[in-house]
Amino acid sequence: MDLHDGLRRLAVRGGDLTEVRTELDRLLRRAVGYDVAAISTVDPATLLWTSCFVTGIDQEGGGERERVIFDLEFRDADLNGYARLASAAVPVAGLHQATGGRISAAARYEPLLRDLGFGDEARVMLRSRNGCWGSLTLYRRTPSPPFGPVELTLLAGAVPLIADLFRLTLLRAALDVAGGHDEPPGMLVVRAGGVVETVSTQARAWLDAVDDRGRIPSAVWSVAAAARAGNRPATAALPSRGGRWVVLHGSPIEGSADRVALIVEGARPAVLGQVIARAYDLTAREREVTALAAQGRSTRQMAADLGISPFTVQDHLKAVFTKTGTHSRGELVASLHSRHYAPRTAAGASPSPYGWYLDDGVA
């Protein structure tokens, strides 16, 4: 079984985020090989970390290691930065390859890599067509060889599958968190031959938005058939009567020959968390600018993304700095992480498939 087949099977089988990351670690170790891994989820709106799963190393001192990585990332002061990698043509980079074999040129070498005996690092941003959902950071200790072009290409080819795996895992978790967000997803189970076994209240509401005559849209049957035939997840989007799009995600149910589970959700953009918006009284445009700043976008890129002038972008940034008590983009992003993300991650809040967190138990 190759890596892609293993990832598809894992997407079908499912499990909670810890189980999925444990199995992903097993698959990647077998396909690529490494000594230590940090497998993280990120908020697609800001690319800030919402959870981290580490294997292959003692967790003592993990907080200091994170501090080093975050400090360099927020200051955009090192090679292969995560935010930059997320928008790169290929969201995978090896440190040995990027430095021509001189990994000591990286700012994180002295405070992090050298003392741990790491001889190379591969960073991967898990980007799909509808957002970035996580990151992989893989380390090899000396005297293991560095990550080669073939291995980095293999990781790059797996990026869309792993990204979709993460979002599907988060969607399944969202089904179980009552009140975790507005307009929650729903689920229905269908059998071959057009038999609907179960429809949740939320799924019925989404299907009624497509057709309010009590009928099951034909797209349900096509997604279910595709999932059943290919033994892998299948997806389709269809317009609703209100102008929004409804998205269907179908997966075969493991151990059943003809049953398929479908998650139904409303398509929505990833946006800066309402908690942050309320904390600083940010306007809608200021929220957009803040999110783009967190993603490492330049002023010109922000202007192009938002359809406004660079001068207007700067005006919005100044307003955001004033409201958040910060003075630069790096300080702004560091403040967002330390004030809003780090406490919730430490408290065990669950990442959301729409950005931010499902269970916001931290004031």
Image (cartoon, helix red, strand yellow):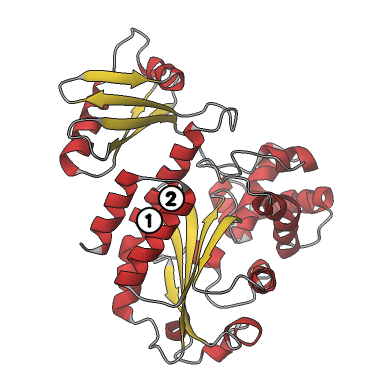
**Residue 67 left/right relative to 31:** right
Give the camera-side residue of 171 and 130: 171
Disc 2 packing (10 Å; few <14; some 14–19; many ≥20): many
Residue 85 is situated, as x and y percent measured from the top left of the image, at: 49, 66
Name the amino acid type tagged 1: Ile
**Residue 64 left/right relative to 125:** right
Q: Where the N terminus falls, by quadrant?
A: bottom left
Residue 7 is situated, as x and y percent measured from the top left of the image, at: 31, 55
* Circles 2 and 1: CB atoms closer than 8 Å: yes
Above or below: residue 314 compared with residue 110: above
- The structure residue drawn at horizontal position 41% and vertical position 77%, both measured from the top left corner, is 34
Q: Disc 1 marks which residue?
A: 162
Above or below: residue 336 compared with residue 350: below
- The structure residue drawn at horizontal position 64% and vertical position 70%, both measured from the top left corner, is 62
Residue 116 is situated, as x and y percent measured from the top left of the image, at: 57, 84
Above or below: residue 362 compared with residue 303: above
Give the camera-side residue of 6 and 111: 6
